[in-house]
Image: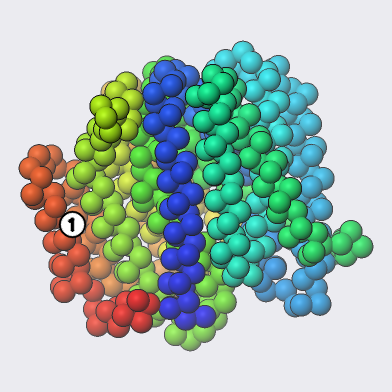
Amino acid sequence: MSLKTLGKDSLIYGFGHVVSRLITFLLLPIYTHTFSAEEYGVISLAYAFIGFTLVIYRYGMDTALMKFSIQAANTEKKSYISSIYLLQLATSLIFSIILFIFRENICILILGVNDANLISIIAVVIFLDNLWNHHILLLRSENKSSAFIFFNLLNVVLTMMFNIFFIIKWDYGVPGVLIANLIASSSVFIFSLPIILKRTSIYKVNPIILKKVIKFGLPFLPAGLFTMIMELSNRYILSFMKGIQHVGLFSAGYKLGIFALVLVMGFNMGWTPYFLRRIKEGEAKKDFAIIATIFLGLVGFVVFSVSIWISDIIRFSIGGNHFIGQEFWSSEIIVPVVLFGYFFFGAYVIQLPGIYAKNITNWVPVFRCIGAVVNILLNILLIPKYGILGSAWATAISFFIMALAVYLKLYNSFYVNYNWLGLCYPVIAMLVSTLEIQNTFPRIIMPLGYIFIWYVFIINEDEKKSMKGIL
């Protein structure tokens, strides 16, 4: 699998992810013009809970499905897929029933409002989302990127459409957001069902394989939980320390950090199958170093450019209607910091091959735990004085610490000779972008200058050749 193939797959995944996220991003104007900061805070806590709970529902089986559907022998592949999926079906049903039973007890704790019906809807949404994501994960493992992107786009288009109906046309309020998600999730589950039906059989479930995949996947559960804690705990800490309206402001600003996140996530969708196939090849490390320079240089460019234009993006208006509701404009201060954090998340992702090559997946929870602990401590320290800005810096610093921890662990066992000038240049540029630059002309010239300096003076000849090959 060549660098050109990685570039092609990442471009397809990235494009699909960008379009998917862009459609979701367009919900932000609807939410910020329709809901108050407090109401948007409730929605944000609901999505935070869904993201956190999905990790528990999967308990590493999504990672196991990805690994074994790629690496298992053809004669065993159906047994692996059947065993993993039917296990997920059974446990997801149990988890959702538990949520439904205790909905009255947990609704205020989880959402900050006394409406148990919201938890009931969430329980079904999580059940369906977990299963249909396993369906399309198989498409990703088979490099069927176009079909994979189609189902993701279908989900977000339906979510967008039903949000417009339930929120704008029918005025359902906060419950309308979750009902729209429920209909979208149900539709994608039904349409993607043939994918899993063709690849599974109840007669192929194998207890020995079940034991093997559980042993492999379970270490990813605490890792996933720590990641969600790192990503989402600040919402609950903000709610406790500052009030739910600050959760709404923070979430609006965090959503604007989507520009870097889509790059990292789109890249990672092509990156994981790429390095799993190449990891044992002799020249793999050299290519990994080249990919790191090109990828992080691109992420740095996006962070740099968006940071110096974010004020205009937020205040962009058509016919006097601003893109973001004025009540949420103060959230712009956290956007460059959020983008900065996603750059270091990309630095973490780029080092994943070493973890798999050395079979130290048991260390993944340790890395994520370090990030989660740092994040919680810094949130507690910084929120009282700096509010949402302190919370954003807490997350950014925790991503940096997590990436550094991986590098130090792999330094002796899986050393990659990175182009450090190529990795440091984006960081320096991103720090420059935090300065206030009012004039339009410098803000137009600076991104062009970033690209020129990066290509002419920063990257080496091998990296330039690889870029030409990818293009």
- Residue 50, horizontal then vertical, whole percent: 60, 36
Q: Quadrant of the C terminus?
A: bottom left
Q: Position of residue 163 (x, y in %)?
A: 54, 31
Q: Secondary structure at mark 1?
A: helix
Q: Decide if residue 351 is in sight here.
A: no
Name of the residue lying farthest toward the top? 114
- Residue 78: image quadrant is bottom right
Side of 90 relative to 295 (left or right): right
Colour scheme employed for the rendering of this structure: rainbow
Question: Is 422 situated above or below 336?
Answer: below
Q: Which residue is rendered at x = 66% and y = 30% of the image?
A: 122
Residue 392 coordinates in the image, percent (x, y): 34, 36
Can you say whether 66 is above or below 311 in the image?
below
Residue marked by disc 1: 447
Q: Amino acid at mark 1?
A: Pro
- Residues 463 and 469: in front is 469
Q: Residue at x 23, y 52 (%)?
A: 304
Where residue 131 appears, as percent x and y from the top left, is 71, 48
- Identify the residue at horizontal 78%, vertical 65% (top origin): 199
Identify the residue shown where x is 57% and y is 77%.
277
Quarter of the view holding residue 185:
top right
Q: Residues within 10 Å of mark 1 (few under 14, many from 20)?
A: some
In the image as oriented, which residue stretches furthest toward the front?
Answer: 319
> Foreground: 375 or 436?
436
The number of numbered badges drawn on the structure is: 1
